[in-house]
């Protein structure tokens, strides 16, 4: 195989998530919905989140159309935010953004750190960030409604 | 076929290495590479006679105006237009179509009128008409399409009617390569009193195009897809049509006389070229036309028919690859649209990129068409005068590698 340098990008964990995306059933009664589209490539991501009485993420639905990086990131995201408060989710999102842009990031990213290799392929970073920026917007839209 | 080996020597970029591999440029439908003569024409202009056009009495202005207008004449001759006055410089195809949408269409398409399009239009020949339809109360109507990407003309008589005011149609599909029967459809459009705009972005660079033979009222195309610089495009319009049209952008250059409260318009085509034009790139496009004329457009077309035919044949070796669009290379342009197994085109694009092969991946600015084909995205390889059968082989071998790479689900890292 002549693509050794690609093995970082297409890490086994990433390919496994792409083939078996987690939490892909659509939630019918979400508290938060988030949708992201990349107009340049047509990738899509749709996220539904249900919160428990304490405001923690109790269930996640995530559906997407797109490349392996986009799909795998979404799948990992849907696992990683389970049980977290929205503030903790926002912090995780910032940490993932830092990971992608080469900044200092926290250690709490779990298997999301396998996506660090995407940094070697700058054009593909947006693939990894689509789900997270959609999530950020979804939470932002939800916050004012929550305070009313 | 063209002597691509010799042609390649004229294109400095083609000797570039990407990730240590020879560059295989198969993204010509997005933009073409430039021969040395085009690049040199820009240098000659800026080093030798840079001056604004149509203004000064000094030597450099006269020289730049002559070169600028000579380029216009070259473009007119290239598409067999009767007069250089029919050639309006724009930035690109998109701007040329927007010019027509914001002038002729705004003033001549009314409530209940129909704008006839095809399902394979590039966004540039769709979105401007959506605006006209919304603002003027007109309706967009689409000629049906067969599964192989050719137009379904069985009920064509029922499609054209008294309300049809404009047929806006892509000559060669940028996605699937379909060559549409523009001449026949233009005749039908004219029979019901409709006007015809042809999106020639993928035809003018690749085959002989004769505006009188097609009998189109408007033809839009871009310089950068035909060996010319970016930032220069062309709107051809029949002279009598142009004569009746209101200006698009207003300001300097497009006026004849100006008072504080009013103005009169300059002669054609300056009436449609407000402000200082893109002088250097227009001259560069003239040099690109010279290059293509020397090759001969019949030869260019034949070269691409052979490359596409060879490519389609070699693609048959790849069971996992689906090819979209017409299968007969005689009725399609030099682009092959495909998907490889369940590998997303972006992942495919990255793997090809690492082998030095540049292909386009995504929706190709034809999102509605992708939905019609039932796919989110596709990959496209598109050919031009400097491409070789060896490069097609490299492409097919590269695809085989990519398919094999993704066939192995579990891989250590």
Image: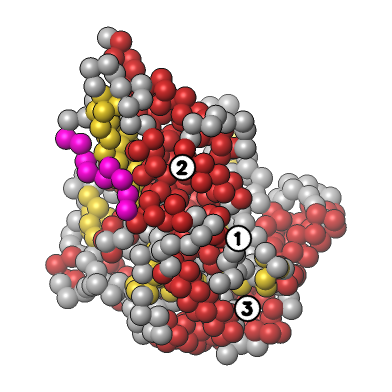
Q: Is residue B401 visible?
A: yes
In the picture, measured across the screen, residue B313 lies left or right of residue B161, that is right
Relative to residue B223, is residue B158 drawn left or right? left
Q: Secondary structure at mark 1?
A: loop
Left or right position of B101 against A1: left
- Most distant residue in the top direction: A148
Residue B72 vs B113, above or below: the answer is below
Q: Label 3's element? A: loop
Chain letter for mark 2, please. A
Q: Is the C-beta separation of discs 2 and 1 under 8 Å?
A: no
Instruction: Between residue B72 and residue B222, name the one nearer to us.
Output: B222
Mark 1 belongs to which subunit?
Answer: A
Q: Position of residue B184 (x, y in %)?
A: 30, 76
Question: Which residue occupies 32% across, 49% down?
Answer: A21
Query: What is the chain identity of the residue bearing mark 3?
Result: B
| Residue B263 % position (x, y) | 54, 36
Say which label, 2 or 1, has the lower sequence index. 1
Give the residue displayed 71% in from the left and 56% down from the top.
B280
Residue at 30% in and 37% down: A47
Labels 3 and 1 share a subunit: no
The residue labelled by disc 2 is: A111
Label 3 sits on residue? B386
Q: What distance separates the C-alpha of mark 2 from that of mark 3?
A: 46 Å
Number of other residues with Cα within 10 Å of mark 1, as a class: few under 14, some 14 to 19, many 20 or more: few
Query: The C terminus of chain B appears in which quarter of the rendering?
Result: bottom right
Picture residue at 37% right of the left edge, 75% below the top: B321
Query: What x and y, as percent, mark residue B375?
Result: 31, 60
* Image quadrant in which the N terminus of chain B is located: bottom right
- Checking the image for residue A5, the label placed there is 1
Residue B62 can be seen in this image: no
Viewer-proximal residue, A106 or B14? A106
Looking at the rendering, the stretch of residues picked out in magenta corresponds to A20-28
């Amino acid at each position: 195989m002549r693509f050794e340098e690609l093995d970082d990008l297409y890490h086994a964990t990433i390919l496994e998530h792409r083939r078996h995306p987690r939490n892909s059933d659509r939630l019918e009664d979400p508290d938060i919905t988030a949708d992201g589209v990349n107009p340049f490539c047509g990738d899509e991501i749709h996220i539904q989140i249900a919160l428990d009485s304490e405001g923690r993420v109790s269930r996640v639905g995530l559906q997407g159309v797109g490349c392996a990086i986009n799909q795998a990131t979404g799948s990992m995201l849907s696992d990683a935010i389970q049980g977290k408060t929205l503030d903790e989710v926002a912090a995780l999102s910032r940490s993932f953004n830092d990971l992608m842009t080469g900044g200092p990031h926290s250690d709490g990213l779990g298997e999301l750190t396998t996506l660090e290799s995407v940094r070697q392929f700058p054009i593909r970073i947006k693939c990894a960030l689509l789900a997270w920026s959609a999530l950020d917007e979804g939470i932002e839209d939800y916050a004012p409604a929550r305070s009313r | 076929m063209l002597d691509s080996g010799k042609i390649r020597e004229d294109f400095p970029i083609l000797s570039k290495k990407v990730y240590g591999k020879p560059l295989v440029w198969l993204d010509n439908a997005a933009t073409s590479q430039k021969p040395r003569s085009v690049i040199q024409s820009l240098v000659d202009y800026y080093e030798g006679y840079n001056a604004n056009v149509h203004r000064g009495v000094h030597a450099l202005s006269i020289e730049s105006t002559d070169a600028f207008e000579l380029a216009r004449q070259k473009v007119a001759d290239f598409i067999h237009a009767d007069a250089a006055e029919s050639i309006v410089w724009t930035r690109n195809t998109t701007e040329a179509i927007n010019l027509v949408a914001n002038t002729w269409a705004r003033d001549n398409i009314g409530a209940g009128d129909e704008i006839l399009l095809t399902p394979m239009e590039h966004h540039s020949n769709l979105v401007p008409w959506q605006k006209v339809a919304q603002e003027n109360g007109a309706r967009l109507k689409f000629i049906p399409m067969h599964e192989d990407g050719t137009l379904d003309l069985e009920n064509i008589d029922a499609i054209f009617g008294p309300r049809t005011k404009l047929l806006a149609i892509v000559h060669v599909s940028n996605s699937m390569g379909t060559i549409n029967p523009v001449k026949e459809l233009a005749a039908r459009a004219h029979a019901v009193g409709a006007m015809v705009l042809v999106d020639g972005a993928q035809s003018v660079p690749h085959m002989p195009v004769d505006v009188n033979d097609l009998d189109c009222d408007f033809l839009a195309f871009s310089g950068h897809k035909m060996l010319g610089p970016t930032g220069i495009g062309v709107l051809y319009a029949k002279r009598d049509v142009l004569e009746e049209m209101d200006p698009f952008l207003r300001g300097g250059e497009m006026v004849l006389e100006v008072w504080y409260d009013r103005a009169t318009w300059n002669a054609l085509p300056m009436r449609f070229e407000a402000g200082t034009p893109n002088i250097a790139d227009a001259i560069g496009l003239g040099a690109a036309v010279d290059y293509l004329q020397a090759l001969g457009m019949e030869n260019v077309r034949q070269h691409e028919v052979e490359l596409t035919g060879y490519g389609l044949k070699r693609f048959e070796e790849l069971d996992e690859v689906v090819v979209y669009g017409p299968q007969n290379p005689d009725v399609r342009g030099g682009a092959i649209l495909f998907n490889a197994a369940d590998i997303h085109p972006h992942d495919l694009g990255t793997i090809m990129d690492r082998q030095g092969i540049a292909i386009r991946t995504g929706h190709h600015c034809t999102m509605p068409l992708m939905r019609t084909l039932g796919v989110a995205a596709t990959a496209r390889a598109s050919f031009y005068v400097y491409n070789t059968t060896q490069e097609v082989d490299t492409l097919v071998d590269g695809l085989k590698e990519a398919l094999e790479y993704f066939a192995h689900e579990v891989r250590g890292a």
